[in-house]
């Protein structure tokens, strides 16, 4: 009997990377609601991962009533393409979860391939109003279910005095522009010589080398800490020693790390790209600046420090409390139990 059984297709690498993904969080919460969840794939090699994903669809085709597919905009887009067509072959309802911030570019550049995925899905799921809008103007019916966090797991720290201690939690990848964080720190130290930066995340495409080169060029070795990947528990603990969260990305959806920072009481200064303006109300629960403009980001950091904008922190926490499982669970349960 396949009632309440789901196959989740995505990068199930939490045991290898020590980093809990949206896939891991949603799977765990659905299990608590009584669903049986099968996940694929945990293979690091991309070809083996794709093969295992396709085999999982074949293997579980008569056992599950839905397949969730994390859908990204870079090379992993083709995972979604192939696995969705396997689902069609075996007549399984599949639901792409739109994770990639650059998916609107995919819709434009690969309209036929996009149509194969999104016109034949049971339901397209957008974690942000940004992607819901971009998909619907292309004619794809899309349901908004926000990215979720279990808010009780996020201890709010009220920062009564904000200091120039910056935190970056993102992969070292060119689309996230981590070198801008170093440029921001260099400029910030002109007014605040004791300013520091901690950067947390894996090296995805060799960009870490560029970051380290810039650190050495600007002689910032004593002001920058690079931790590599930390578990959520570890970086949440680390965040208590920092006062401002910076997000320097050039392409984005609604990143979990930014939502988490808002929950933890860190004022967020982010580039104004992709889904970020759908997540952050500028100067109300965070601050948005143009991409690739480190001086603008520095200027906003100055304002937060000098004016001690604690209201940003309070408003941000209130907003992300609406992303708790207790709020969004009914949307998932209604969707996944529609056929009962």
Image (cartoon, helix red, strand yellow):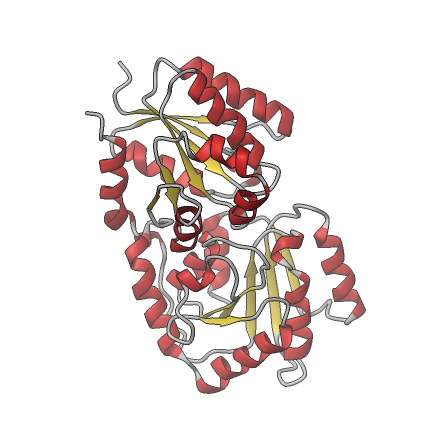
In the image, farthest residue toward the left: 340
Q: Residue at x 47, y 44 (%)?
A: 99
Q: Give coordinates of residue 93: x percent, y percent.
A: 35, 25
Marker count (numbered): 0
Q: In the drawing, does residue 172 fall left or right of residue 306?
A: right
Q: Give coordinates of residue 322: x percent, y percent.
A: 28, 57
Q: Residue at x 45, y 16 (%)?
A: 89
Q: Nearer the viewer, residue 234 or 95?
A: 95
**Above or below for 95 versus 214:** above
Q: Nearer the viewer, residue 2 or 94?
A: 94
- Classify the position of the C terminus by image quarter: top left
Residue 336 occupies which quadrant of the picture?
top left
**Above or below for 74 versus 340:** below
**Residue 93 appearing in the image:** yes
Residue 64 occupies which quadrant of the picture?
top left
Q: Give coordinates of residue 258: x percent, y percent.
A: 46, 59
**Above or below for 161 versus 42:** below
Q: Give coordinates of residue 296: x percent, y percent.
A: 59, 77
Q: In the drawing, does residue 257 fall left or right of residue 338?
A: right
Q: Residue at x 42, y 76 (%)?
A: 283
Q: In the drawing, does residue 319 fall left or right of residue 38?
A: left
**Above or below for 301 versus 151:** below
- Classify the position of the N terminus by image quarter: top left
**Residue 243 appearing in the image:** no
Residue 125 occupies which quadrant of the picture?
top left
Q: Residue at x 48, y 34 (%)?
A: 115
């Amino acid at each position: 009997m396949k009632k309440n059984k789901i196959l989740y297709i995505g990068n199930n690498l939490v045991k290898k990377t020590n980093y809990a993904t949206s896939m891991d969080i949603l799977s765990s919460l659905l299990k608590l609601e009584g669903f049986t969840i099968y996940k694929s794939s945990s293979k690091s090699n991309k070809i083996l991962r794709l093969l295992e994903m396709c085999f999982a669809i074949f293997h579980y085709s008569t056992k599950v009533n839905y397949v969730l597919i994390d859908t990204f905009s870079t090379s992993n887009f083709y995972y979604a393409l192939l696995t969705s067509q396997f689902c069609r072959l075996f007549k399984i309802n599949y639901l792409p979860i739109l994770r990639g911030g650059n998916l609107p570019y995919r819709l434009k550049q690969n309209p036929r391939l996009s149509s194969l995925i999104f016109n034949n899905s049971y339901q397209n799921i957008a974690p942000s109003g940004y992607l819901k809008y971009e998909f619907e103007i292309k004619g794809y019916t899309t349901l908004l279910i926000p990215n979720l966090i279990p808010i009780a797991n996020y201890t709010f720290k009220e920062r009564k005095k904000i200091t120039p201690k910056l935190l970056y939690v993102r992969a070292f990848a060119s689309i996230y522009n981590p070198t801008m964080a170093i440029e921001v720190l260099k400029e910030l130290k002109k007014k605040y010589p004791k300013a520091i930066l901690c950067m947390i995340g894996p090296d995805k495409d060799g960009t870490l080398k560029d970051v380290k080169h810039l650190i050495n060029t600007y002689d910032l070795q004593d002001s920058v800490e690079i931790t590599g990947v930390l578990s959520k528990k570890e970086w949440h603990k680390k965040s208590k020693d920092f006062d401002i969260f910076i997000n320097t990305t050039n392409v984005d959806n609604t990143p979990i790390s930014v939502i988490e920072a808002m929950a933890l009481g860190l004022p967020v200064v982010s580039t104004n790209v992709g889904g970020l303006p759908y997540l952050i109300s500028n100067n109300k629960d965070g601050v948005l600046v143009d991409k690739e403009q480190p001086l603008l980001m520095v200027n906003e950091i100055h304002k937060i420090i000098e004016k001690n904008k604690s209201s940003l922190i309070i408003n941000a926490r209130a907003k992300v409390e609406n992303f708790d499982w207790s709020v969004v669970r009914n949307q998932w349960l209604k969707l996944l139990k529609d056929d009962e």
